């Protein structure tokens, strides 16, 4: 079945530490890939997206993501986390044959002082 | 980037009443609008997709008679929760897309928190 999976429900990191949030997808053809961030009670903000080309994508707020076709993954990374990064992070896909955006379950990031 | 607004941002209503939520694309024409529902600490679940001037396409399990969607213009879509019940309490988020077939032009509204007493 087609799906987008975020294996980690909740991650806690110390401020200044590096971060990696995992995202895996299961589609026949590589879909368009996105990462969004949602602060409590707020809407979604696009961090970055991948359609094709360079597999390392730079986004806003110092985030980057790497597309790995062999692993069907699109993991989000940040070298040094700030307290303001605490939020919910969603991986999303738009399949090539269907323009509806589908979301992973989300990963809640807590940042320790 | 493009702006999508929702109104109201919060609404509290009594069980059995109907509630209308508006979604507007402020600086672009939205050929397609999407409505999502998000339960606390959960992901966004697509409820329906609507194209301007057409009937909405609902996801499996979403009651179309309960969640009425109207997309009468290229800048406005409305979601009406009819005969609301406490289980309809949720965070509703709309999204609008401009150019057909270009996925990165999908923009999200700030959401509407519905509480049904």
Image (cartoon, coloured by chain):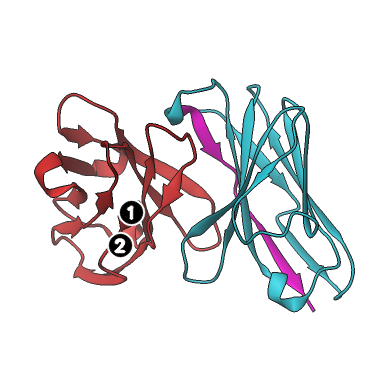
Chain colours: A red, B cyan
- Chain ID of residue with mark 1: A
Q: Indicate whether residue A40 is drawn in magenta.
A: no
Q: Nearer the viewer, residue A102 or B90?
A: A102
What residue span does the magenta drawing correspond to?
B105-117
Residue in the image at 55% along x and 28% along y: B2
Q: Is residue A5 left or right of residue A99?
A: left
Q: Secondary structure at mark 1?
A: strand
Q: Nearer the viewer, residue A4 or B24?
A: A4
Residue at the right extreme of this rendering: B17
Instruction: Check if mark 2's residue and mark 1's residue have beta carbons within 8 Å.
Output: no
Question: What numbered label is drawn on residue A33?
Answer: none
Q: Quadrant of residue A95?
A: top left
Is residue B4 in view from this perspective?
yes
Percent across and percent down for residue A107 are 33, 64
Q: Give the mark nearest the N terminus, 2 or 1.
A: 1
* Residue that carries the numbered disc 1 in the rendered image: A4
- Chain ID of residue with mark 2: A
Mark 1 Cα shell of 10 Å, populated few (<14), some (14-19), many (≥20): many
Residue in the image at 18% along x and 47% along y: A72
* Residue that carries the numbered disc 2 in the rendered image: A83
Tag nearer the camera, 2 or 1: 1
């Amino acid at each position: 079945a087609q799906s987008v999976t975020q294996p980690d429900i909740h991650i806690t990191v110390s401020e200044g530490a590096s971060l990696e949030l995992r995202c895996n997808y299961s589609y026949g053809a590589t879909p368009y890939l996105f990462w969004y961030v949602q602060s409590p009670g707020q809407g979604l903000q696009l961090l970055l997206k991948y359609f094709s080309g360079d597999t390392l994508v730079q986004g806003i707020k110092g985030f980057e993501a790497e597309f790995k076709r062999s692993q069907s993954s699109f993991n989000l990374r940040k070298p040094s986390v700030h307290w303001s990064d605490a939020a919910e992070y969603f991986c999303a896909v738009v399949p090539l044959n269907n323009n509806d955006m589908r979301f992973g379950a989300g990963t809640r990031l807590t940042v320790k002082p | 980037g493009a702006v999508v607004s929702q109104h109201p941002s919060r609404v509290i209503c009594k069980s059995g009443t109907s509630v209308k939520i508006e979604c507007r694309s402020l600086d672009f024409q939205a050929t397609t609008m999407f409505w999502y529902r998000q339960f606390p600490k959960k992901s966004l679940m697509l409820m329906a997709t609507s194209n301007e001037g057409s009937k909405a396409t609902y996801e499996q399990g979403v009651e179309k008679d309960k969640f009425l969607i109207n997309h009468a213009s290229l800048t406005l879509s409305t979601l009406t929760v009819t005969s609301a019940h406490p289980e309809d309490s949720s965070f509703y988020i709309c999204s609008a897309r401009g150019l057909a077939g270009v996925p990165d032009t999908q923009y999200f509204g700030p959401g509407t928190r519905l509480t049904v007493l």
